[in-house]
Amino acid sequence: MSGSFSKKILYGTLALALCGCGLRTRSLKEFLNNPLNEQTIVENAHLRHPSAIVVCRTKQCAPAKLSMSREYIHNSLLHLFQNNSRKTGLVCEADPGTHACTENYIQLPVTVGIIPAYFYIDSFKLTDVSVAKDNTQLNLVINYNVTYNGQTPDCLPAQTMVFVKNTSNILFEDPGYMCKMNAIGQTSIKTVFSIDYIDLDYGYIGGYYSIGLSGPSYGGGTGYMLLKLPNDAYPLAPNLRSPRKTKTPSKAFDILEQENPVTNSVYPNSNVKVYPIRK
């Protein structure tokens, strides 16, 4: 009995030595089932709040709180979304320091029923853009391109709100949209996106995200993602005036002007000319 107990202690110590800190990221059941599996399980940590928001315009980038107002950022985002209405944008996992994509999608570990899976979003379509009645937030309708384990579920559009509280707090969130990922029931997917980077020249928006699933499929995770919109944020300049056309005077007007030089100087400060009718 004593020898058997000593062997268990020895095997347990050996497993801990081989796996290092595996118990920190895995449950005891997962560890006992496969103690040598070193795959790290992504945890759904709290959303990270950025310390500053960087805005790029006219090829220059600077913290928004140094030279911009809340209203300027609000209006710039409105122009950006309006210029990209009914357009398709890209989504990628990115590095928060360089704002460069590290993957062509964002990936979250989820459980579909009882099956482990990975949840992907690689693009979205901006279906509608509007301004709230109190002019404090922007309302977007977004269709995310969602896949999991090679399958594409039927998902409803996300009714998304963009709220610019101040130059240090811009939140992009939705109350949850439904996806049919199982044979029975609907899964609710909720997204919160804390923006810390806006490039008005090239249509980039970056920030820390938190996405959670609830229902027959559940899971989620956090990270840093980048949105790439096809158009920039600058509104189109409408051509309010028709181009001026230079008219070539006819010979009859030249003759009248030569014969009546005094009459045609009645309005010296205007382009109006008087041509009397001869009897």
Image (cartoon, rainbow, N blue to C red):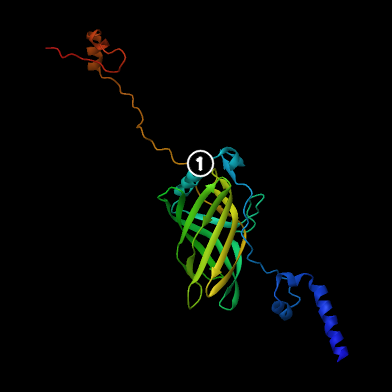
The three-letter amino acid code for the residue at tag 1 is Tyr
The quadrant the N terminus occupies is: bottom right
For the residue pair 49 and 41, the one nearer the viewer reads as 49
Which residue lies most toward the top here? 262
| Spot occupied by residue 265 in the image (x, y as percentages of width and height) | 27, 10
Placement of 177 over or under 91, stated as above or below: below
Q: Which residue is mark 1?
A: 72
| Spot occupied by residue 16 in the image (x, y as percentages of width and height) | 80, 75
For the residue pair 83 and 224, the one nearer the viewer reads as 224
> Which residue: 84% across, 77% down?
14
| Spot occupied by residue 246 in the image (x, y as percentages of width and height) | 33, 24
> Which residue: 78% across, 73% down?
19
For the residue pair 240 and 213, the one nearer the viewer reads as 213
Query: Helix, strand, or loop for circle 1?
Result: helix
Which residue lies most toward the bottom here? 1
Placement of 117 over or under 83, stated as above or below: below
Q: Quadrant of residue 64?
A: top right
| Spot occupied by residue 123 in the image (x, y as percentages of width and height) | 53, 59
The quadrant the C terminus occupies is: top left
- 173 vs 2, left or right, is left
